[in-house]
Amino acid sequence: MVCTTCQQVWYADDATFVKMRLWFDVLLEKGPMYGYFPKPSKCILVTKPDRYDLAKKVFKGSGIHVQVEGSKDTGIEINCEGTRHLGAAVGNSEFKHKFIKSKVDSWISTVKKLAAIATSQPHAAYAAFTHCLQGQWTFLSRATNHWKIRSELTLFDLFLDETSTTWKETC
């Protein structure tokens, strides 16, 4: 794509909202010529709280409908908290902690179910544990700065220690 205003590679966080808007408009216009069909409904702009109103103002109009709450059926979602991106949390610390806590709660629930299954089908439970859950934990630890989510993961480690002790006693 040829863009006369772009002379180098940059990330969206290196630009102003006005530059991002110009870039997005060019992408919407010229992208289809190259087989790229951007969908504003799948775009999420995470901004700092003090820049939120400016982002709403810059991205309004020109067929891009700003969605600030609820479903994103027609336009770009703009928020100040964060979002999930490629399996990891992007945003402020509170959002990241909530995201990790929901993952940990889900894993604890799954391990409890696997523990019940393991009493009658130990190999199936072990396979699910090593081929599914373990990969999820590894990915999240690599995709997220694990020092900042240490407290959530520590609770999960304690749960695993308790559960594995129970399993050893029953075997």
Image (tube, rainbow, N blue to C red):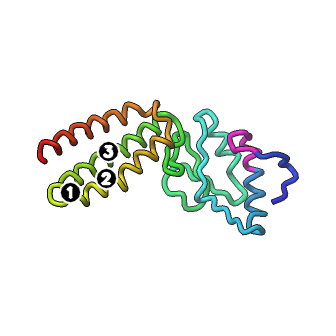
User: Farthest residue in the right direction?
Assistant: 4
Total of numbered circles in the picture?
3
Q: Residue at x 45, y 44 (%)?
A: 140
Q: Which residue is mark 1?
A: 122
Q: Which residue is mark 2?
A: 129
Q: Residue placed farthest to the left in the image?
A: 170
* Residue 112 badge: none
Q: Quadrant of the N terminus?
A: bottom right
| SS of the residue under disc 1 | helix
State the CA–CA distance, disc 3 to disc 1: 23 Å
Answer with the quarter of the image where residue 120 lies: bottom left
Give how far across and how far down residue 73 sits, in percent.
55, 61
Say whether disc 3 or disc 1 marks the residue closer to the N-terminus: 3
Q: Which dot marks residue 105?
A: 3
The residue lying at 41 percent from left, 41 percent from top is: 100
| For the residues bearing labels 3 and 1, Cβ distance under 8 angstroms | no
For the stretch drawn in magenta, the main secondary structure is: helix
- Position of 149 with respect to 117 (left or right) is right
Element type where label 3 sits in the image? helix
What is the magenta range? 10-21
Camera-side residue: 42 or 90? 90
Is residue 18 within the magenta segment?
yes
* Amino acid type, residue under disc 2 in the picture: Phe
Question: From what the image shows, is residue 11 above or below residue 30?
Answer: above
Between the C-alphas of marks 2 and 1, the distance is 10 Å
**Considering only vertical position in the picture, is 165 above or below 72?**
above
Which of discs 3 and 1 lies nearer the camera? The answer is: 1
